[in-house]
Amino acid sequence: MDAVHPSAWAFVVVALGGALLSVSLRNILHAIFGLALALFGIAGLFLYLGSPFVAAMEVLIYVGGISVAMVFAVMLAYSLGKKEGGSTRRFLAVVPVGGFFGVVGYALLRASFAVTSKTGSWDLKLVGRKLLLDYNVVFEALSVVLLLAIVGAIIIARRDEKTGDDKTADEKAASKGNDAASAEERAS
Amino acid sequence: MSADTSLVAPGAEKKRGYLALLVAGFFTLLSGMWVTLKNLFRKPVTLRYPRERPELSTAFRSAIDLVDFEELGSHDCVACMQCVNICPSFCIQVEGQKYDGVKRKRATKFLVDYALCSVCGLCIDVCPTETLKYSKIYDEVSFERDAFVFDLLEPFVEREEAFLEGQRIADAKEAEEKKKKAEAAKKAKAAVAAKKKADGGEEAEKAEKPKAEKPKAAKPKAEAPKAEAPKAEAPRADEPKAEAEAEAPKAEADAPKAEADAPKADEPKAGKVDKAAVEAKPAEPKPKAAFAKPDSDAKAASLARIEAAKKRALEKKKQAEQQAEGEGE
Amino acid sequence: MLKTLSDLVPNVFLAMLLAAAAIMAFATVNALFLVWLERKVSARMQRRYGPTVVGPFGMFQTLVDVVKLLSKQLISPKDIDKPLYHLAPIVVFVPVVLGLSLFPIDKSFALVDTNVGLVLVFAFAGMGFIAIFMAGWGSNNKYALLGAMRAVAQNIAYEIPLILAALAVTMIARSMRIADIVEAQGSFPYILVQPIGALIYYISAVAETNRAPFDIPEAESELVAGFHTEYSGMRFALFFLAEYTNMVIVSMVATSLFLGGYKGPLLPGPVWFFGKVYFLIFVMLWLRWTFPRLRFDQLMTFAWKVLIPLALANLLVTATVLKVMS
Amino acid sequence: MALNGAGKGPELKEAAQPALIKKAQGAPGTLSEREEAQLMAEAEPFVRFHLLEDLLNAARANSLWPLTFGLACCAIEMMAAGAAKYDLDRFGAGVFRPSARQADVMIFAGTISRKMGPVIKALWDQMPSPKWAIAMGGCTIDGGPFKYPNQYAIYEGADKLVPVDVYIPGCPPRPEALINGILELQNKIKAGRRFKPSTHEGPIPIAKAERTNAPTGRKVKG
């Protein structure tokens, strides 16, 4: 194995540090910013591995887009600045997390890594060709998944045009049930 | 795609399509930009204030001031107190006095607190002698809160004596003329009356001479303490109960209060002396040699002048009383 | 051939130091100049004089302002989110410095040269929102938070047409390397080929920099000063510096993509490059002092209902024409 | 002194001379002793770096960013001073900052009502030092036309709330007066002078010469 350049270790430290921050911090917003830091470190690693396009995309989409979207989601859905933390739940979390790490570790140990990136010119054109020719179906399928997610989000967030309220279909059903119940009460 | 309704006036979107609207909107933006671009190359309208002074409109109102009448050579405030009474802001203070030999009353003190004044103009409307007007002060500024009590009599103090003199003569003349008319009407009685009055007039003029000396004697007295203490100290040291309260209102303070303030007042005084000295110079050029002082501290000088004038007035009053008593006998 | 700083300077760390110093110096001087220019231009458009007292034509006015800001008290409000509040002014500056280094200012010189320069610029621009959000959240101030949320929502909305417009250009130039794009504009700049794309890009760029008429994140009539409401002294100056440097970056991108970068007759490359950049910045100032601020719903409507469809249509037409022609 | 009477009762006379009353009571303005001491300490630092201080003072004087803050009618004149005809920006004072954190000078432009008082105090406290205050108009100097015995609605002067550096009389003052006030404040800052609690030394008119040389002149005849 080649000697790893110190700058790569710097990125590793940034990525791991960010990851650690994102799981250890109590304040959920701090955690998101830690995640952004981790993603930034990963982008640096991509850069080190000779794929600036992927690195740039990592920053553009994950640091600039996804983490901001997460912040937004938190602001809209979460009571701000609330500090979460039940100690029993944390121990419960060990089970799925441990399972996940077990699976990933097993896969890592079993897989054999061939260095492909340094052979050819792994640049933009190649990425484009691979995505749109070789992995076309996967790419499109992923797009459809994202599209579905967006449509779903719109349906959930959409106002009911007739009543003008913010209730989702479920809530409406629930309230309908309540209405029926109250109607019954009134009748009796 | 339907036209965007929120960007345009209602109704407009029905006539035009999406793209037509966009293009039309784009051109309105361009026309707006053309306006600012034109103005970019036009000459600024700014009045560069400290270098250029504004031409004030004749309707411009500022703090009130006394009119300087040419035929009188002075203002014509008779201290009737109408302005004081009508002022809604309580910002005018007037005191007046009747001088011997002069028919009308005369203001001895006319203070206006510009900080309280709201330039309503009621005092000007009500003034019977029309001696009040708006001044053209427009950029007065101070580091001190109490700097805006204007003594409107200040420019007239030097001329006051001359004015009184002239007025006395004029009044005497007028009286004489009246008497002459009366004479023409009733000869026998008039002769006796005229003689009596003429005597009285002579006496008054005689009394003037020793009086005229008195203020000169009084002046060094007023100056003496000022030489030691800086500026504003003068009136306080001079006479705590003096009318100088107008200029240095502190003077009216109770004795213990003044003492309590004294240590605090010490420090900044040193800083203020030079400033006072600098500002005193352009304040008021004194044409009259008799009032020109070695020390150019204008404020203290004017205070001393007011002081002297007041003393004179008092003495005159006393004399007049004595005369009246003498005549009565 | 294009040379970078690391080609000219043998030592890598020396090159990095040099680049950082050059960028910081440029950013500072540029911000000083731009603020002065803004005040002068706004003044002349309103038929005033603007700063006249400090230096010739008041040129040192902003220098004096910065010295004053340096000497002001730094206030840390109560109950702030300390790490975020203190980090934000620094983080806001990082993408700015990174972004500035990517542009070829002459035929033969750029500080850094990479084959995905264009994507990197937008990626770094995207990082700026995080700093804005950190500032808004960390200040523990409702106005700051509202301003930050508006800023982020607006930036996300306008980044889409921005990138779509730039994408059409990369399709024509067949490269994401900025130097290649500039070179591909042979005798005529791409603004002639892509007029609508250029317009969309420029409008979105103005919105990206949070400038009027899209300056609702710091709309003083509603939000005090937006996300930097609680910042005083030098911290505030850093936000200011970043804002004005961001203007330069988006103008540099526009220059490289649509105006032919350093290309031009007679004069040397850097002169043309910076001439075009500052012309675009002047247009930004011009816009700011002409148009009133948009309402937030108008802003969003304009992005989602006008700019994005137009940019998509532009992209589609460009792709079709390219396919047919090739 | 037995001069002719003023024609008004003593209570009205007092009202006519509020300054006198204030003096007589020795009212110390608004500052608590702690604030006063702090200000004095600020005014005389332990160690002085003259060149640096002069430089900083010059910078501060030429970069007075006012707070966007108007209380009443005087604010209209303040806006006018910032607009094209008068252009405060010529002196570097045209950057009206919306946030108190970024402002240097607070221009009190209008009547200070009791309800507004705490707000003003909060804004003032939010401003980072060094900071200055300008009292613009009669209301902010000592209450102006709203001042009368037993009034309950206003603060009689801005210096009841904060230490004021420059007073500008008028109702309202012209924009020129505000510019003059800014210039005087610049002089004050350049000279390195800080606010010191009022010592009631008596009036020191600054612009006395201005007053006698007003454009139309004082010498109206007839």
Image (spheres, rainbow, N blue to C red):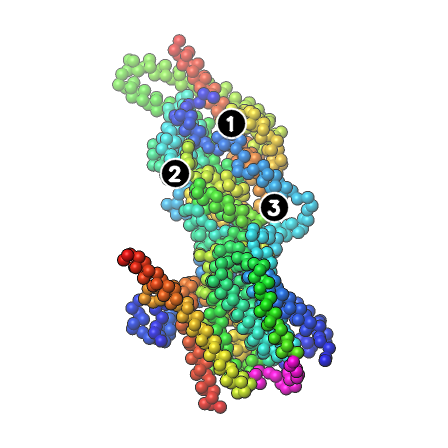
Estimate the x, y position of residue B169 in percent, counting from the top left: 40, 24
Residue that label 1 marks: B252
Determine the image quadrant of residue B297: top right
C78 to C178, vertically: above or below: above
Q: Is residue D141 visible in this depiction of the protein?
A: no
Please give the label number shown on residue D191: 3
The residue tagged with tag 1: helix, strand or loop? helix
The three-letter code of the residue at mark 2 reads Lys
- Other-residue count near label 2 (Cα within 10 Å), few / some / many at <14 / 14–19 / ≥20: many
Determine the image quadrant of residue B72: top left
Quarter of the figure with the N terminus of chain C = bottom right
The residue tagged with tag 3: helix, strand or loop? loop
B137 to C155, vertically: above or below: above
- Other-residue count near label 1 (Cα within 10 Å), few / some / many at <14 / 14–19 / ≥20: many
Picture residue at 68% right of the left edge, 73% below the top: A8
How far apart in space, not on screen, are marks 3 and 2 (Cα)?
38 Å
D202 to C280, vertically: above or below: above
The three-letter code of the residue at mark 1 reads Glu
Q: Which chain does the residue under circle 1 lie in? A: B
Picture residue at 53% right of the left edge, 85% below the top: A135
Estimate the x, y position of residue A85 in percent, counting from the top left: 56, 59
The three-letter code of the residue at mark 3 reads Ala
The first of marks 1 and 2 along the sequence is: 2
Please give the label number shown on residue B133: 2
Q: Main secondary structure of the magenta part?
A: loop
Query: In the image, is residue A116 part of the stretch drawn in magenta?
Result: yes
Q: Which residues are magenta?
A: A110-129
Picture residue at 43% right of the left edge, 83% below the top: C317
Query: In the image, is residue D147 part of the stretch drawn in magenta?
Result: no
- Other-residue count near label 3 (Cα within 10 Å), few / some / many at <14 / 14–19 / ≥20: few
Estimate the x, y position of residue B267 in percent, counting from the top left: 62, 35
